[in-house]
Image: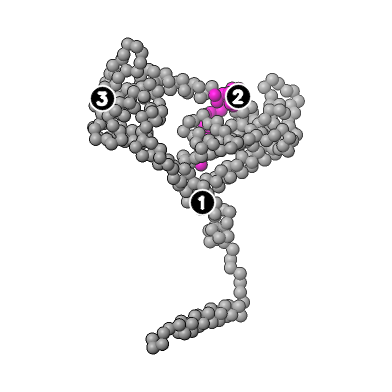
Amino acid sequence: MFTPDHPADGTPPEFPFTPLPGRRLLTPERQRGFIAALARTGLVAEAATEVGVSVHALEKLRYAKGGEGFRGAWDAARRFGRAEGTRAARRQSARRTAALGFGAGDRGLGDGDLGDGGLGDGGFGSGDAGLESRSLHPGRRTSRAAFTGPEPSPEDPLLGFAPFLHPFPRRNSITPDRQRGFIAALAATGSVKQAARAIGVSLEALYTLRARGGAEGFAEAWEKAIDLGIARLEDTALARAMEGEARPIVARGEVIGEYRVHNDALVMFFLRNRRPARYGAPAERPAPPERSEREILDSINETLDRARERMQRERAERPAGD
């Protein structure tokens, strides 16, 4: 079993191992620096950033031939008490932030979310104007669908629906104000689960309210808000199809530029659905207009006349004697 040397002052211990030689980028100094950073932070991505190496390169080194010592030091550094404490503190901080953002009264919802999955791993950055990521999962915070748009203003016609009025309201009833808050959040996120978190109500209670008599206005506003969320998703997907995804160019552990990757499948999806007459399946394309026999003969004669004129021009342009 790998046993690190624990110093007396409480700093991260040394994890002695034999670095793999012959690595141009992952020098022995960087290998030791990564293990030390991993023992301090407990996070592979953060430790990799400190030494200026990609996680992919480190993973390749971890499972390379002769990398048993590096792999053992890696595992021991992650099990180090300070590293585990750092990860636990990060998770607790993320949960606390999420509770402040979504409302701590919600206990019936899981961590997953329709709005967190998104359109793919490449995603979009957080610099989009008017969008804010509230995903609990750091790996999903670059997904365009994890970002929420601005909520409608109180004067928006969407919020002018007739809410359901409880005949005997209780402390935890979904009041008209909470119904409007749910519709506003749903229009901004397109996710029922995220909107439910925003007002601290379970999905079951919302669907029960929607199905009750007298809640027709609430149900209609619900559908309109979903349509707005889907429109936002469609807009972001179209922007991704047209603009592509920015990918970094890394050399010697540093980002020196970027290039764009376009998703041809996504482009064809939009073309087939937006221009079915031209790009759709043959069965979806309109049949060519029917022509009479006279029109067909005239078209053939016109083509023959153009061919005859072209041959005459070519003969006239030939040098004499050819």
Tag on residue 103?
A: 2
* Circles 1 and 2: CB atoms closer than 8 Å: no
Extreme residue toward the top, this view: 8
Q: Identify the residue at image location x=51%, y=53%.
A: 268
Q: Which residue is nearer to you in this view: 249 or 229?
A: 249
Crowding at dot 1, Cα within 10 Å, few <14 / some 14-19 / many 20+, comes out as some
Where residue 146 appears, as percent x and y from the top left, is 54, 35
Tag on residue 17?
A: 3
> Quadrant location of residue 286?
bottom right
Where residue 39 appears, as percent x and y from the top left, is 36, 22
| Residue segment shown in magenta | 97-119
Residue 274 horizontal side relative to residue 82, left or right: right
Of discs 1 and 2, which sits in the foreground? 1
Between the residue at mark 1 and the residue at mark 2, the CA separation in whole angstroms equals 38 Å
> Quadrant location of residue 187?
top right
Mark 1 = which residue?
267
Mark 3 or mark 2: whose residue is earlier in sequence: 3
Mark 3 secondary-structure assignment:
loop
Q: Is residue 215 visible?
A: no
Where residue 196 appears, as percent x and y from the top left, is 61, 30
Q: Identify the residue at image location x=28%, y=18%.
A: 3
Between the residue at mark 3 and the residue at mark 2, the CA separation in whole angstroms equals 47 Å
Question: Where is 267 relative to 97, above or below?
Answer: below
Between the residue at mark 3 and the residue at mark 1, the CA separation in whole angstroms equals 50 Å
Q: Which residue is nearer to you in this view: 216 or 161?
A: 161
Q: Amino acid at mark 2?
A: Gly
Mark 2 secondary-structure assignment:
loop
